[in-house]
Image (cartoon, rainbow, N blue to C red):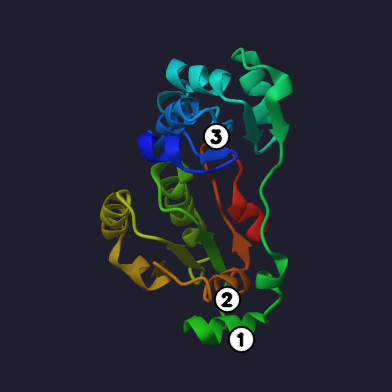
């Protein structure tokens, strides 16, 4: 990859995001090809294991520019010795037109969800740090007082999905009809999912910027 980057006729090389190794190939290729390198790092400051690594901060120092999602991320990197002048805060966004209001009735009909029950929804990356396990534990308390509530979990299947499946399988059998899983949903279905739920629950442990909050 670094060789391809070095010879590619680009004016600027941009790469996203840490801690994936292609970031370092981007830096090496840009240096060999004498091209400016811009990083969009997506740093998760609370994830010490994944992101609090000297090689990441060293690479950012060598880059010509850095795009931060938030002021918090920019300040975090500044404290790690990154020149604040090279950091630009750009942030994330969504296309609001995609999430134009759809009636709850229409959304639930589309997704074959009950019309007369409250729905708590998690819609996002199926990952350990997203707090889905916390949400499931919380729902066992919710169901004591509100047994008709549906828990909707939607996202692309990933490595953590097996752990999630095992966790759900250990729930009492009477909870089975209170779960609604939408794995690998399409972009077309996404606005229906958000409009079908009553409460969006996203107890993530750490984020660079949680785009799902904007979508909700």
Q: Quarter-wise, where is residue 180 in the image? A: bottom left
Q: Can the viewer see residue 216 in this picture?
A: no
Q: Quarter-wise, where is residue 86 in the image? A: top right
Question: Mark 2 near mark 1, Cβ–Cβ under 8 Å?
Answer: yes
Residue behind mark 3: 41
Please provide percent x and percent y for residue 152: 47, 66
Give the answer, above or below, for where 65 lies relative to 142: above
Q: Is residue 146 left or right of residue 126?
A: right
| Residue 192: numbered disc | 2
Q: Is residue 107 left or right of residue 185?
A: right
| Residue depicted at 50% across the width and 56% down the height | 124
Sequence-first tag of 1 and 3:
3
| Residue 106: numbered disc | 1
Please provide percent x and percent y for residue 106: 61, 86
Sequence-first tag of 2 and 1:
1
Secondary structure found at label 1: helix
Sequence-first tag of 3 and 2:
3
The N terminus appears in which quarter of the rendering?
top left
């Amino acid at each position: 990859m670094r060789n391809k980057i070095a010879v590619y006729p680009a004016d600027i090389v941009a790469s996203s995001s840490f801690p994936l190794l292609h970031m370092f190939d981007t830096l090496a290729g840009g240096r060999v090809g004498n091209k400016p390198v811009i990083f969009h790092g997506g740093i998760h400051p609370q994830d010490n294991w994944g992101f609090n690594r000297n090689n990441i901060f060293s690479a950012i120092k060598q880059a010509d520019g850095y795009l931060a999602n938030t002021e918090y991320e920019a300040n975090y990197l500044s404290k790690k010795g990154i020149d604040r002048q090279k950091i630009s805060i750009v942030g994330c966004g969504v296309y609001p037109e995609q999430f134009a209001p759809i009636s709850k009735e229409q959304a639930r009909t589309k997704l074959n969800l009950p019309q007369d029950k409250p729905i708590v929804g998690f819609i996002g990356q199926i990952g350990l740090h997203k707090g889905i396990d916390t949400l499931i534990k919380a729902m066992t308390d919710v169901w004591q007082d509100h047994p008709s509530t549906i828990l909707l979990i939607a996202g692309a299947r990933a490595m953590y999905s097996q752990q999630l499946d095992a966790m759900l399988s250990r729930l009492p059998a009477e909870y089975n009809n209170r779960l609604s899983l939408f794995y690998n949903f399409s972009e077309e279905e996404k606005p229906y999912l958000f409009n079908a739920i009553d409460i969006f629950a996203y107890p993530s442990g750490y984020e660079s910027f949680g785009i799902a909050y904007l979508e909700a």
